[in-house]
Image (tube, helix red, strand yellow):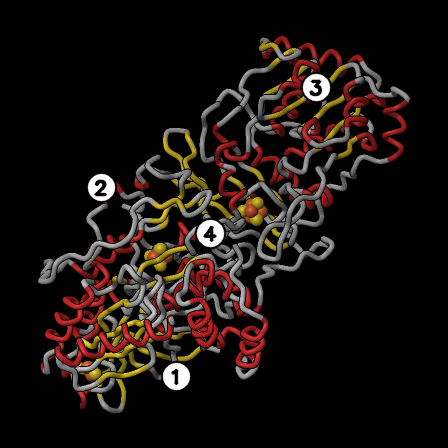
């Protein structure tokens, strides 16, 4: 149901039930706001989103975020009355705000700065002495620093810990101009989602320890990606400068993660930068790539095709697993391609799922089974002569027994991204690109096909697993592996797998493509009832 | 340490809590009980109240800090709340303050060494028609003058000494 309204004399049709603020922003009509956040209950406390409504007794001021649109409503966001109200509310918010911008991590993406430049631009007319309150760099949790005088008391962070995590660690004490945001003395803001409070804080009052003083935000370049730390596959921005990733930020997706991510996902940016391998290694020693490839080519061509065991990966993309599978199907024995999955981890009813990998469903779609009894028996009989492992650090989680039998295989070839001690036991280790460095697709637990994009290109000399295997297959003169990029692999894959609509890589929308799959029923967005947002109208509009 | 209500007080609280549709609504009465029992609301007390009202400690902290009538530091046996709002101010509240400060040698927000008196300034006590006025514990003292203040304070000291015997 849509209804007709007018904003600034412009006739509009908007969905019934949304508020004036969403109606305005959704139609590219700018309107100042601080405390409103689409996925939190409305608090209406900052009073900056003032608009004028035409009524029977003339125009009246009201806040846009807490007023639903009704049929025939006549709204002004830019009338002199509305503008004065917006400006004055802002002036109050800024009154006791410190001039910290040069040393504040929020500068550049701060709503106070942005709104002042857009709606303020008045001269300061302070007549009372400045009131100083609170502490400036209070560590209130493992990841969070609070600066009390920067807080504009919008209560977004409080509503987040009350409504989303339901842990209620934050509150406001005292009254009036003395009001101060705080935790209970001696208790910390430590929940699995605490990092989100630093995103939704419109100012620099809550900042992330891991990002403090690391980088000015305007230097960061953003790339759309997906978190790989669990099967939810939350949507992310990878933010980097000069090939170093400084932070991962949630990217709005109403169905999958709204504007939240868990701390584990957020902190995984370190893995992108640290302990990467870039050179091929022979029993743990760096060796020449060309000669090593030749060597394993000889091994693979020399061995009986029944004696090759392949390990696919729930961390690798569909493309990587698809190519590995194709090689087993076309040349070796497909029954000898299996996956190894880590044990289930922590989960909750917000976002985190127990499967700590992003593409388990992708393996199901490609029909790559888990390691089976019969394979284990063959392993124990020392049946296999070659083990080909793709992006699966099984040495981190597999049972010692299994590890032992795997390590007894004569020739072990591993494609991986990060350094490990076990490389000494491995004949050939080849570096491949990690998720922040490549194109690819993943299918999350709810059945969304989502794409990752390269954010950094620190190691242009190395390639994706899929391309590495494709090139190897080409060298071995196996037809059907003429691929140069994972994008080409996807385009071939979507033609071949009947489960996908026949689309091309660039046609996958940035918020994912739902594929009706039999995925053991992980329901979409299991947010509890009071957090339900019925009408997500303005897709793609970034709220912070 | 453990700050807990005595059994009778806990029962009293449960009766009050049962009057409200939600348990958190009983927070203010719970804080009153706590102040009556423990004299003032220390952080331990607030934490305990959070447990029995079943809300987060910081939410109790918010409410306790919001209301000036809740004491967050120890107060004397006699707690003086002196009105400083307009009716009282026009009728000489400042003289009352001076008289108290001279008599007790304390400033607003302080407690005397013998812990007998504490003293603070408050806004309108809703007794403007008898300004200037103050409250000592639960009782109002009205139409004050500096002489009357001295009389009252001496009387309280006497009363305290008698009780001690
Ligand atoms: S800390 Fe930030 S999010 Fe929380 S109330 Fe203050 S300004 Fe708002
Ligand atoms: S919930 Fe899962 S996908 Fe989302 S940010 Fe956390 S680890 Fe990543
Ligand atoms: S955004 Fe509407 S009152 Fe704050
Ligand atoms: S002004 Fe003192 S009681 Fe009202």
Task: Give the x, y percent position of residue A104.
Answer: 28, 44
- Residue B41 vertical position relative to residue B140 in the rendered view, above or below: above
**Some atom of ligand 1 lies within 8 Å of the CB belonging to the residue at label 2:** no
**Chain of the residue that carries numbered disc 1 in the rendered image:** A
Do discs 4 and 1 share a chain? Answer: yes
Quote the CA–CA distance across marks 3 and 1. 67 Å
Quote the CA–CA distance across marks 2 and 1. 46 Å
Quote the CA–CA distance across marks 4 and 1. 48 Å
Which mark sits nearer the N-terminus, 2 or 1? 1
Q: Are marks 3 and 2 in contact (CB under 8 Å)?
A: no
Residue at 62 percent across and 24 percent down: it is: A468
Residue at 90 percent across and 28 percent down: it is: A377
The residue to which callout 1 is attached is A71
Quote the CA–CA distance across marks 3 and 2. 51 Å
Task: Give the x, y percent position of residue A85.
Answer: 20, 71
Which mark sits nearer the N-terminus, 4 or 2? 2
Horizontally, is A87 left or right of A404 in the view? left
Do discs 3 and 1 share a chain? Answer: yes
Which mark sits nearer the N-terminus, 4 or 1? 1
Crowding at dot 2, Cα within 10 Å, few <14 / some 14-19 / many 20+, comes out as: few
Task: Give the x, y percent position of residue A380.
Answer: 88, 24
Which mark sits nearer the N-terminus, 3 or 1? 1
Which mark sits nearer the N-terminus, 3 or 4? 4
The residue to which callout 2 is attached is A102
Asked whether A206 or A368 is in front, the reply is A206
């Amino acid at each position: 149901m849509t209804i007709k309204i007018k904003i600034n004399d412009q006739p509009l049709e908007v969905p019934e039930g949304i508020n004036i603020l969403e109606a305005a922003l959704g139609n590219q009509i700018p309107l100042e706001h601080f405390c409103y956040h689409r996925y939190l209950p409305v608090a209406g406390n900052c009073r900056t989103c003032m608009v004028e409504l035409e009524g029977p007794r003339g125009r009246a001021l009201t806040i846009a975020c807490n007023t639903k649109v009704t049929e025939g409503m006549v709204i002004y966001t830019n009338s002199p009355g509305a503008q004065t109200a917006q400006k004055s509310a802002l002036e109050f918010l800024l009154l006791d705000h410190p001039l910290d911008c040069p040393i504040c991590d929020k500068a550049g993406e701060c709503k106070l700065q942005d709104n002042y430049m857009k709606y303020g631009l008045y001269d300061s007319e302070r007549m009372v002495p400045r009131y100083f309150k609170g502490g400036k760099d209070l560590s209130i949790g493992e990841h969070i620093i609070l600066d009390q005088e920067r807080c504009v008391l919008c209560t977004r962070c409080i509503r987040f810990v009350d409504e989303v995590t339901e842990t209620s660690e934050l509150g406001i004490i005292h009254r009036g101009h003395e009001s101060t945001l705080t935790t209970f003395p001696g208790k910390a803001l430590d929940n699995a989602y605490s990092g989100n409070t630093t995103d939704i804080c419109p100012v620099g009052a809550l900042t992330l320890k891991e990002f403090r003083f690391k980088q000015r935000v305007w230097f960061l370049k953003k790339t759309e990606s997906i978190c790989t730390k669990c099967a939810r596959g939350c949507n992310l921005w990878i933010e980097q400068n000069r090939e170093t990733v400084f932070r991962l930020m949630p990217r709005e997706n109403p169905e999958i993660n709204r504007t939240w991510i868990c701390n584990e996902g957020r902190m995984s940016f370190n893995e992108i930068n640290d302990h990467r391998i870039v050179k091929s290694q022979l029993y743990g020693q760096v060796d020449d790539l060309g000669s090593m490839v030749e060597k394993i080519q000889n091994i693979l061509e020399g061995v009986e095709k029944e004696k090759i065991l392949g390990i696919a990966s729930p961390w690798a993309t569909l493309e990587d697993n698809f190519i590995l599978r194709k090689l087993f199907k076309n040349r070796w024995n497909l029954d000898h391609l299996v996956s190894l999955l880590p044990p289930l981890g922590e989960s909750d009813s917000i976002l985190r799922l127990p499967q700590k990998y992003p593409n388990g469903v992708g393996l199901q779609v490609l029909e790559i089974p888990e390691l089976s009894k019969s394979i284990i028996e063959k392993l124990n009989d020392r049946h296999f002569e070659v083990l080909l492992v793709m992006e699966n650090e099984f040495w981190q989680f597999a049972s010692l027994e299994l590890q032992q039998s795997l390590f007894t295989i004569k020739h072990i070839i591993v494609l991986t991204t990060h350094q490990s001690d076990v490389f000494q036991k491995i004949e050939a280790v080849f570096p491949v690109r990690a998720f922040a460095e490549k194109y690819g697709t993943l299918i999350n637990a709810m059945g969304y096909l989502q794409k990752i994009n390269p954010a950094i290109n620190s190691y242009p000399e190395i390639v994706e697993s899929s391309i590495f295997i494709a090139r190897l297959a080409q060298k071995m003169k196996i037809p059907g592996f003429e691929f140069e990029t994972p994008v080409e692999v996807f385009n071939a894959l979507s033609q071949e797998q009947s489960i996908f609509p026949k689309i091309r890589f660039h046609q996958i929308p940035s918020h994912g493509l739902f594929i009706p799959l039999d995925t053991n029923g992980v329901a979409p967005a299991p947010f509890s009832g009071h957090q339900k947002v019925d009408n997500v109208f303005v897709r793609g509009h970034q709220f912070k | 340490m453990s700050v807990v209500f005595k059994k009778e007080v806990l029962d009293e609280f449960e009766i009050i809590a049962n009057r409200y549709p939600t348990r958190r609504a009983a927070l203010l009465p719970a804080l009153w009980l706590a102040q009556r029992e423990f004299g003032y609301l220390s952080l331990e007390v607030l934490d305990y109240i959070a447990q029995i009202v079943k809300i987060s400690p910081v939410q109790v902290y918010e409410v306790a800090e919001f209301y000036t009538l809740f004491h967050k530091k120890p107060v004397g046996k006699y707690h003086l709340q002196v009105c400083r709002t307009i009716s009282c101010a026009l009728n000489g509240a400042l003289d009352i303050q001076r008289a108290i400060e001279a008599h007790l040698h304390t400033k607003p927000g302080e407690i005397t060494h013998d812990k007998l008196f504490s003293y603070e300034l408050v806004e309108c006590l809703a007794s403007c028609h008898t300004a200037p006025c103050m409250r000592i514990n639960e009782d109002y003292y009205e139409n004050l003058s500096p002489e009357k203040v001295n009389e009252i304070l001496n009387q309280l000291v006497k009363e305290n000494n008698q009780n001690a015997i």
